[in-house]
Image (tube, rainbow, N blue to C red):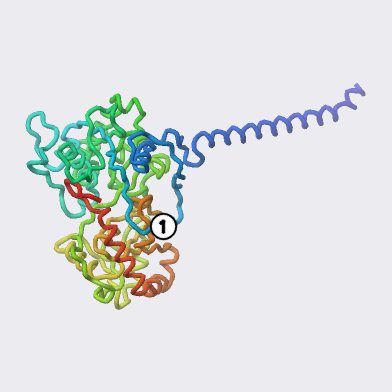
């Protein structure tokens, strides 16, 4: 009994040491296991870089070769801070994305017309799937619908690729055997489907937009092409920020063509796998632009919706800061009546055009400014830009952090400090890069 009492403290101490060692060992193993999990899933993006869907696409663009190449460049990272564009050590000239003229081979699903041209009121005859675009191209609705029409232009481009092309401008061709293809294209006009058919009509329980998304998911996941790659080599268009709202959560392994990442969780859409495409500008091009610094009397131009939600709060703050500046045009405007013509004249006669975040980080106003050769002033901290691997936007755009733009007189003083020579260099560069943001059928060289 006495011996037991003498040994009790020792036994208690032994138990405490054992428990401490067990806790320490378990913690170390837990930390190590998370370390290896993060390494195997691509760090913070949780992506296996060896399975990136557009690795072959990047290789084609980079090398002009139809065989996949190993990637030696650093993929851009996702940040929440303002856009920082590093100047590339290259000459100030346009870069041909595909210098060896090896076209990208694209397999396009023959989806029923209800997924594409029937949404534009085109009527198929018999079992016809596609319109005869040599006879007549179905028209896309005008106005603001046009800004998200990339789905329409890319589909027409693939259809026209089957006709003879003597211009040498063809960079992608349609193939009918999916095993020969570099990528698989899904011709669903998701943006116009959202714009036109997202409301539930009196005779419906669910909108046509939702029903078509459900049909699309069922169709794609049943295809051998999808099963073969898990969808990673598929290209799906969702340029309108509210388009494909239901299906995106089920089709996320595919490459999305988007306007920005504003309404996407990072694990669904990110710069590692998806493509940012330009808006189709809605104002008219400035043809034969012979203007100069002095012939554009307006210093800074903005016309559009001023009161926005989410990231667009900055618009109303800037309105109160700039509304009394004599050479600044900052007013509410829309496409109603003569709105597009008014905006065209305003941008064509302005030195700088404001591009401010709206409900999402991007807007077509940037591309309207480029078409007008009006130097864009971009105030959108989370914006992602198309062709950033080809174009140095700092050569023809001014980037301003939101926090700086909202400081008293910061923005107006910055713009006034840019003199004739610098503005002329940027204006000249705008005219050179404008071709990157044009769309046409058939496509034109460059």
Which percent across, then down, holds residue 388?
A: 37, 52
The tally of labels here is 1
Residue 64 visible? The answer is yes
Which percent across, then down, holds residue 305?
A: 27, 61
Tell me: residue 180, above or below residue 338: above
Mark 1 lies on residue: 381
Residue 416 versus residue 393: which sits nearer the camera?
Answer: 393
Which percent across, then down, holds residue 279?
A: 27, 52
Tell me: residue 285, above or below residue 125: below
Q: Is residue 21 left or right of residue 78?
A: right
Residue 72 versus residue 159: which sits nearer the camera?
Answer: 72
Measuring 81% from the left and 31% from the top, which residue is drawn there? 13
Tell me: residue 137, above or below residue 111: below
Based on the displayed image, in which of its 4 quarters is residue 197 positioned? top left
Residue 167 versus residue 419: which sits nearer the camera?
Answer: 167
> For mark 1, does the 10 Å Cα neighbourhood hold few (<14), some (14 to 19), or many (20 or more) residues?
many
Measuring 90% from the left and 27% from the top, which residue is drawn there? 6
The residue tagged with tag 1: helix, strand or loop?
loop
- Which residue appears farthest toward the right when viewing the image? 2
Q: Which image quarter is the N terminus in?
A: top right
Residue 308 versus residue 157: which sits nearer the camera?
Answer: 157
Residue 199 visible? The answer is no
Which percent across, then down, holds residue 367?
A: 27, 57
Tell me: residue 324, above or below residue 51: below
Measuring 33% from the left and 52% from the top, which residue is drawn there? 95
């Amino acid at each position: 009994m006495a011996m037991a009492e003498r040994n009790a403290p020792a036994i208690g101490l032994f138990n405490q040491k054992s428990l401490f060692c067990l806790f320490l060992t378990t913690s170390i193993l837990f930390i190590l296991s998370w370390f290896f999990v993060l390494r195997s899933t691509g760090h913070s993006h949780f992506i296996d870089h060896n399975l990136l869907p557009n690795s072959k696409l990047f290789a084609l663009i980079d090398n002009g070769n139809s065989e996949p190449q190993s990637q030696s460049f650093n993929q851009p990272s996702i940040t929440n801070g303002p856009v920082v564009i590093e100047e590339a050590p290259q000459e100030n000239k346009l870069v041909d994305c595909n210098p060896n003229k090896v076209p990208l081979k694209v397999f396009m699903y023959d989806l029923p017309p209800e997924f594409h041209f029937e949404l534009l009121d085109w009527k198929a005859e018999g079992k016809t799937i596609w319109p005869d675009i040599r006879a007549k191209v179905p028209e896309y609705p005008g106005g603001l619908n046009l800004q998200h029409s990339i789905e329409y232009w890319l589909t027409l481009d693939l259809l026209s690729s089957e006709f003879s092309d003597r211009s040498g401008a063809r960079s992608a061709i349609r193939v009918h055997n999916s095993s020969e293809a570099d990528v698989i294209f899904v011709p669903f006009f998701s943006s116009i489907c959202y714009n036109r058919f997202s409301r539930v009509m009196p005779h419906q329980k669910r909108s046509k937009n939702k029903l078509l998304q459900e049909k699309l998911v069922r169709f794609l996941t049943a295809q051998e092409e999808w099963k073969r790659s898990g969808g990673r080599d598929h290209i799906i268009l969702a340029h309108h920020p509210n388009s494909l709202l239901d299906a995106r959560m089920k089709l996320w392994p595919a490459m999305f063509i988007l306007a920005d990442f504003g309404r996407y969780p990072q694990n669904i859409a990110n710069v590692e796998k998806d493509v940012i495409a330009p808006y189709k500008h809605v104002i008219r091009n400035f043809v034969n632009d012979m203007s100069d610094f002095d012939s554009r009397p307006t210093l800074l131009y903005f016309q559009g919706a001023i009161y926005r939600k989410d990231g667009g709060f900055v618009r109303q703050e800037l309105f109160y800061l700039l509304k009394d500046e004599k050479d600044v045009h900052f007013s509410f405007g829309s496409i109603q009546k003569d709105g597009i013509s008014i905006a065209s004249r305003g941008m064509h006669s302005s030195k700088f055009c404001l591009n401010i975040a709206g409900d999402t980080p991007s807007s077509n106003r940037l591309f309207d400014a480029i078409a007008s050769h009006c130097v864009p002033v971009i105030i959108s901290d989370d914006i992602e830009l198309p062709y950033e691997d080809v174009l140095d936007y700092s050569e023809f755009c001014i980037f301003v952090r939101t926090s700086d733009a909202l400081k008293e007189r910061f923005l107006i003083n910055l713009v006034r400090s840019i003199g004739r020579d610098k503005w002329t260099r940027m204006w000249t560069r705008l005219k050179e890069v404008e071709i990157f943001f044009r769309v046409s059928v058939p496509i034109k060289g460059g």
